[in-house]
Image: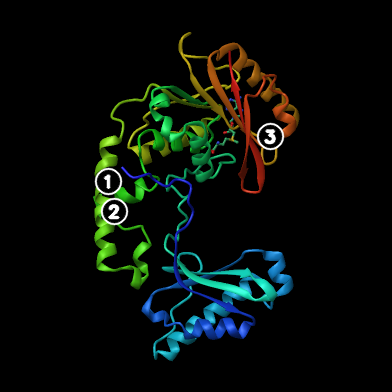
Amino acid sequence: MKKIPRKKLEIFYNVDSFEIKTVKDLHEKCKSIKWSRYFSEKQTFKVLAHFSNQKEIERKSPFKNSLYAAQVVKDGIADSFRDDGLGRPNVELEFPQIQVSLHLTLGAQGTLKASLSFDLCLDPLSNRNHRTKYALAPMRENLAASLVMEMFPLEKKEEWKNQTVIDSMSGGGNFILEFLMMKYDVPPSWPKLKALIEQKRNQFALFNVTTFRTKENLAVWKKITEDLYGQTRKNLPRTLDENVRAYDLDMRAIKSIRESLEGFFGATIIRVERADATKIKKMHEEETGVIFCNPPYGVRLGDEEELEKLYEEYGENLKNNFKNFTAYIFTQHAQLRKKISLRTSSRKAFYNGPLECRLLEYRLF
Ligand SMILES: C[S@@+](CC[C@H](N)C(=O)[O-])C[C@H]1O[C@@H](n2cnc3c(N)ncnc32)[C@H](O)[C@@H]1O
């Protein structure tokens, strides 16, 4: 099977790129594009503008904010439909059928490079559609995927696929779900793919753009989705995976992980139990593998003193009860991580939204 993308957010289909100096330039250019080739007056649409360097563009260009730039594009599109003797498509901000993106970049001598494209995904690819009703400070799914890929490189799958893997504070379960998807070669779009093939219910927005909906593209899409569906069905685990475990202290989190697993894989395919991560133990003395945790770190949850105690006791438990394991802790909090009296064997920076976090690795002997 081809490599499955797990970290991407959006896919754009380019309409045109050009240089502009004034607001009028952008309006005229948008008006001159024959938008009715790409979508119909009956479809709803939305325009989003992104500035590559927000502050500089707002300071040096006539576009003082991205909402204004989006408005200019929207008016240009409406004028283009009118010039073709057609009605104007309705704007829909929440669930549009068509999303036009304007990307503005500041070039030399104050010119602006504008690029207009369609967002072919609409629903960002990071949405796995298993989003549970309950999760405390969940990490974004594509961040969870990046962490899994860092700890379990695909090219070394033979080495890790039968190892014990534990998420000791799993919250909504994003990390363990991404791990299982990678372990069993399940694409993140699996719920959508299942709906498409089994119920003929399309939740992919890919073909809303008329010019993208060619015979060739549709044929390729049909083959890809059918092959991927068939292959994934074969890959799904049939019995409980005894090597993977998820724990959390909060019963609501446990319930939510079970629901997500059932929604995604059709069953709770791993052990999910309520347990205190500072007290858990290996299943048996010879067990080795990976133990992960994304503890609360105080920015959004938890009280500082209690958290210090939690980090300290968690580190002690790793030292005493997880010999020969590799432990990973993903946290943002520099002070709290010092409470773990173990020597890190590596540390790597990741961003959880605006928060700079570290993935710390400990080899436990
Ligand atoms: C930052 S959240 C984890 C979020 C998770 N990575 C996700 O994406 O949904 C921290 C979790 O640690 C759990 N927790 C806190 N103390 C714990 C303990 N002593 N043992 C087990 N879980 C604990 C909390 O209930 C919470 O669900």
- Is 272 or 352 nearer to us in this picture? 352
Mark 3 closeness class: few <14, some 14–19, many ≥20 residues within 10 Å: few
Residue 19, numbered label: none
Q: Which residue is mark 3?
A: 302
The image shows residue 293 at horizontal and vertical percentages of: 57, 29
Q: Which residue is mark 2?
A: 196
In the rendered image, the vertical position of residue 345 relative to residue 258, given as above or below: above
Identity of the residue drawn at 29% across and 46% down = 228
Say what secondary structure mark 3 lies in. Answer: loop
Say what secondary structure mark 1 lies in. Answer: helix
- Is 4 or 187 nearer to us in this picture? 4
The image shows residue 24 at horizontal and vertical percentages of: 61, 86
Front tag of 2 and 3: 2
> From the viewer's perspective, is 294 left or right of 39?
right
Name the amino acid type tagged 3.
Gly
| Whether residue 173 is visible | no
Name the amino acid type tagged 2.
Leu
The image shows residue 334 at horizontal and vertical percentages of: 73, 33
Q: Looking at the image, do the residues carrying marks 1 and 2 touch, with CB atoms under 8 Å apart?
A: yes
Residue 229, numbered label: 1
